[in-house]
Image (tube, helix red, strand yellow):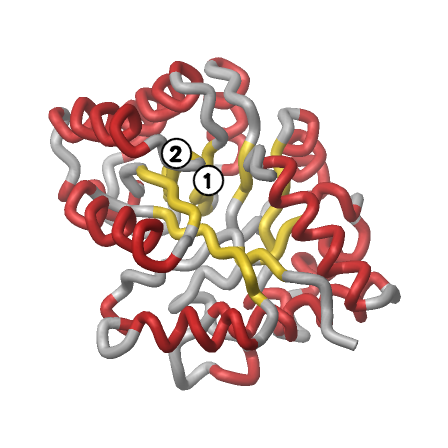
C-alpha cells in the first residue's frame, strides 16, 4: 500500500545542482509520493526562479533574504521584498534567520535584516521559514519581540528546551538528512521524543545530504526514507508519520 502523500517543507529546486533538468527532480519526487514541495528563496536574485517554480510546477514558495548571503542584500531589497510579497503573495517569508556559525557574517546586520523581515511577515500575516545556526536563543528573542503567525524552524538542531519554546510560539520543527546519521544522537533523540504534531519533514535539497548518498545532491525523492527513519526512531508506522507530518505542514503553513 502506498504511503499517504508527503510534503517536503524545504527544498531549493532552483539550485545550480538541478539546472540540467529541474522537472526531472520534480517528477521523481511525485513518483516517490512527495506531492507537495515548499521552495524558499535566499536573495533578490532568485526571487524570479522561485516564483517560476510555483507557476510552472505548482510548488509552494517563500520569499526572503537569507543570512548566509548577507553580502548580496542591500537595504533597498527589503522594499523590493515587500513589493514581491504584495504582488505574488507567497505562502511564507523565508528563508530568513540568523547564522552565527559561518565566519564573516556581520551579526549586527544579520539581526537588523531578520527583525525587518519578521515585521514584514507580521504585516502581511505570513508564516516564516527560519534558518538558525548557533543562534537559537537569539532567534527566539526576536520572535518574542515581533510575534508572527508561526512557521517552521528549518533543520532544527537546538535543545529540547529550545524546541519547546519554538513550539509554544506556534512553530513546527524540520527534520531531514541529519537524522539519517547514527552519530546525530541529539537530533535523533529529539525526533524520537518531541510531540509528533510539532514535526515536519524536509530535505533542504540539494543540501544536508543523507548518510546513504553523501556523494550526490539531496533530492525531494529521498523524503520517504526520511519518513521511514523517523518512524523507526519513534517506533511507529511510516504511514502514520507521513500523514502526521503532512498534516502538520499544512496546518502551520495554513494551507488546505
Label 2, residues with CA under 10 Å away: few <14, some 14-19, many ≥20: many
Quadrant that contains the N terminus: bottom right
Question: Residue at (67%, 75%) from the top-left corner?
Answer: 182
Q: How many marks?
A: 2
Residue 142 lies left or right of residue 110; in this view the side is right
Q: Picture coordinates of residue 123 (x, y %)?
A: 39, 14
Left or right: where does residue 119 sit relative to residue 171? left
Residue at 44 percent of width and 17 percent of height: 122
Pointers 1 and 2 in contact (CB under 8 A)?
yes
Is residue 46 in view?
A: yes
80 and 179: which is toward the camera: 80
Residue 93 tag number: 2
- Residue 196, compared with residue 76, is above or below; it is below
Residue 231 figure quarter: bottom right
Q: Earlier in the sequence, mark 1 or mark 2?
A: 2
Residue 39, position as x, y percentages in the image: 39, 52
Q: Inspect this view and state whether residue 109 appears.
A: no
Amino acid at each position: 500500500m502506498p504511503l499517504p502523500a508527503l510534503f517536503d517543507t524545504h527544498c531549493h529546486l532552483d539550485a545550480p545542482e538541478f539546472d540540467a533538468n529541474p522537472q526531472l527532480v520534480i517528477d521523481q519526487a511525485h513518483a516517490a509520493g512527495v506531492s507537495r514541495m515548499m521552495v524558499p528563496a535566499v536573495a533578490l536574485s532568485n526571487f524570479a526562479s522561485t516564483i517560476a517554480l510555483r507557476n510552472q510546477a505548482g510548488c509552494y514558495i517563500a520569499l526572503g533574504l537569507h543570512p548566509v548571503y548577507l553580502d548580496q542584500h542591500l537595504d533597498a531589497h527589503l522594499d523590493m521584498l515587500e513589493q514581491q510579497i504584495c504582488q505574488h503573495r507567497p505562502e511564507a517569508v523565508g528563508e530568513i534567520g540568523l547564522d552565527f556559525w559561518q565566519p564573516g557574517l556581520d551579526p549586527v546586520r544579520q539581526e537588523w535584516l531578520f527583525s525587518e523581515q519578521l515585521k514584514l511577515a507580521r504585516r502581511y500575516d505570513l508564516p516564516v521559514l527560519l534558518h538558525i545556526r548557533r543562534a537559537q536563543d537569539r532567534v527566539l528573542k526576536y520572535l518574542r519581540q515581533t510575534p508572527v503567525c508561526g512557521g517552521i524552524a528549518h533543520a532544527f538542531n537546538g535543545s529540547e528546551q529550545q524546541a519547546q519554546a519554538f513550539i509554544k510560539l506556534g512553530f513546527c520543527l524540520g527534520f531531514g538528512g541529519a537524522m539519517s546519521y547514527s552519530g546525530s544522537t541529539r537530533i535523533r533523540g529529539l525526533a524520537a521524543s518531541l510531540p509528533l504534531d510539532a514535526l515536519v519533514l524536509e530535505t533542504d535539497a540539494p543540501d544536508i545530504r543523507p548518510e546513504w548518498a553523501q556523494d550526490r545532491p539531496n533530492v525531494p525523492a529521498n523524503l520517504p526514507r526520511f519518513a521511514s527513519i523517523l518512524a523507526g526512531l519513534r517506533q511507529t508506522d511510516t504511514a502514520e508519520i507521513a500523514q502526521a507530518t503532512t498534516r502538520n505542514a499544512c496546518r502551520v503553513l495554513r494551507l488546505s
